Image (cartoon, rainbow, N blue to C red):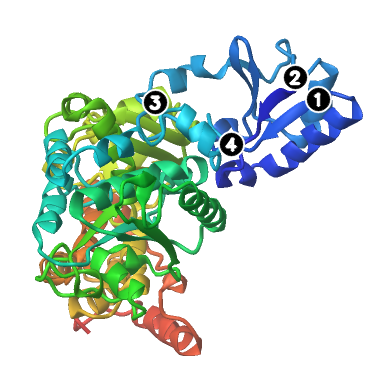
Amino acid sequence: MNVRIYVPRDTSANACGADEVAAAIDEHAQARGIAIELVRNGSRGMCWLEPLVEVETERGRIGFGPLTVEAVAGLFDAGFPNADTHALCLGPVEDIDWLKQQQRVCFSRNGIIDPISLDDFEAHGGWQGARRALAMTPQDIVSAVTESGLRGRGGAAFPCGIKWQTVHDQPAAQKFIVCNADEGDSGTFSDRMILEGDPYRLIEGMLIAGIACGATQAYVYLRSEYPLARRVLSEAILRARTAGWLGADVAGSGRAFDIDLRIGAGAYICGEETSLLESLEGKRGQVRFKPPLPAIKGLFGQPTVINNLITLASVPDVLVNGAQWYRDLGYGRSRGTLPIQLTGNIRRGGLVELGFGVSLRELLYDYGGGSASGRPIRAVQVGGPLGAYLPESQFDTVIDYEAFAAIDAMLGHGGIVVFDDTVDMAEQARFAMEFCAIESCGKCTPCRIGSRRGVEVIDRLRQGVDAQANRVLLDSLCDTMQHGSLCALGGLTPLPVKSALRHFSEDFHSTKVQLCRSPFRGDAFQQAASAMNDLLQEPWQHIGK
């Protein structure tokens, strides 16, 4: 019988050489006459151990990693696939503390199954939630999701059940389910890991949403920067349709439901739900005015559920295990689990899935192992490029939507970017404004113009030009953007700026201005930058100009 060997084809693993390692294993096995079955699985999220190769044995799956192409020959010399004494042998993967201490719900199958194998999916609990949904009334499904306390995992944390109930109650003949997989926040990759490691989980969650709300057509809006996720999901949709889980007669139930995949064009603003809808309709990605809400008048003017990928991927377990089971995993009003992504200057980067309530400090040190540089961690940014910068004094804050709101921060999509004590926080604040200027859809003035003025004011602050007046001006500008912007891009950009000013004010007294990183480009900008630097040598008479 062939020995089953798992080598991930997850994007993170491939970036570390997984494709080359898989080819080397296959080559050495053939040369030595060893019969193996090579399975390209998803990642378990232990990025610091990638490529993580696993061998299926009677004792469970034995891990080896991080494995390089150069190490493969020595591994076979040591008796691979039976090479327990090799220095890269990690023992049973399930016993690795970093993984063992987690509460895997959304990621319970990641790294375990062949992502596009329907047999593997079913053997590990797949379609159980969908089968239960098909035997329930739509209202009972919506009620179960509402009672579970599941909130949107995309950033706004809006109760999923309320959104579903609104669409359920609309009398329209055509309704839609839209999955927002435009994962553009810095330090986030949980959506991609699901798509590359367990794509049928998303398909099942979307199917349940369609049954609950009376929708027959769904769309996945995927960012263009995920080519592997696109290929895996496309194949999974095709296989699910062939197997009868999508189409005109889902699982012989007489109900219709299908999913189409749409690819974005790299615009960060299309992560905002109404801008995403505009893009899906073939228009320029610009934010819509609300009301009407998408749940009442969304895609093509019809009632539409728009949920983040992780939100939809959480739904099958709610139906399989019950609403109370899901509620019990949480903390306060934050129910269930959250996939937390540790990135930046961190020793053990990767994806950790835990119930709400764990502290930021536990994540950074018990799971992350401290900074990769070995220097003290000075700040972390939670929630993407629009999230607040948190100092060490706030590391005991627990992962909970309300706890973060209480310190003027947000959890967002669960991404945590770590910085050691060499970081320039004034430069990070400047980047927030610059990022907004680049990514703004341009529809509202506070976002479009305010972000550009923000870059200029921060540059003057760092130069030390009329520091007090410019600080007042920056505070006023942030207030205008926060309360006057049409969507969260402009409205949340002040969050990282204000937090950097509040906790790291000493960094804003630099004598250097790095105008070369401005969002404005071309010869005209170079001339303006030169003129600006000349002007900064003289006292400013008109701060707002």
Q: CA distance from mark 2 to mark 3?
A: 43 Å
Q: Residue at x 82, y 22 (%)?
A: 76
Please state, as top left, top right, bottom left or bottom right, where the N terminus lies in the image: top right
Q: Secondary structure at mark 4?
A: loop
Q: Are marks 1 and 2 in contact (CB under 8 Å)?
A: yes
Return the residue at label 3. 365
Ranked by sequence position, the earlier of labels 3 and 4 is 4
Q: Quadrant of residue 450?
A: bottom left
Q: Amino acid at mark 3?
A: Tyr
Q: Is residue 461 above or below residue 243?
A: below
Residue 35 in picture, x, y percent from top left: 81, 25
Along the line of sight, the residue nearer the viewer: 493 or 502: 493
Q: CA distance from mark 1 to mark 3?
A: 42 Å
User: Which of pointers 1 and 3 lies earlier in the amino acid sequence?
Assistant: 1
* Residue 542 visible, this orientation: yes
Q: Is residue 531 above or below residue 514?
A: below
Depth check: give the residue in front, 400 or 507. Answer: 400
> What is the spatial separation of the Cα atoms under label 4 and label 1, in whole angstroms?
19 Å
Label 2 belongs to which residue? 1
Left or right: 492 in relation to 479: right
N-term mark: 1 or 2: 2
Can you identify the residue that label 1 sits on? 35
Please indicate whether residue 328 sits to the left or right of residue 415 in the image: left
Determine the CA span between mark 3 and mark 4: 28 Å
* Mark 3 crowdedness (10 Å alpha carbons): few <14, some 14-19, many ≥20: some
The residue carrying pointer 4 sits among few (fewer than 14), some (14 to 19) or many (20 or more) residues within 10 Å by Cα, namely many
Rendered-image quadrant of the C terminus: bottom left
**Closer to us: mark 4 or mark 2?**
2
Kindly identify the amino acid type of the residue bearing the numbered disc 4. Asn
SS at mark 3? helix
Q: Which residue is mark 4?
A: 41
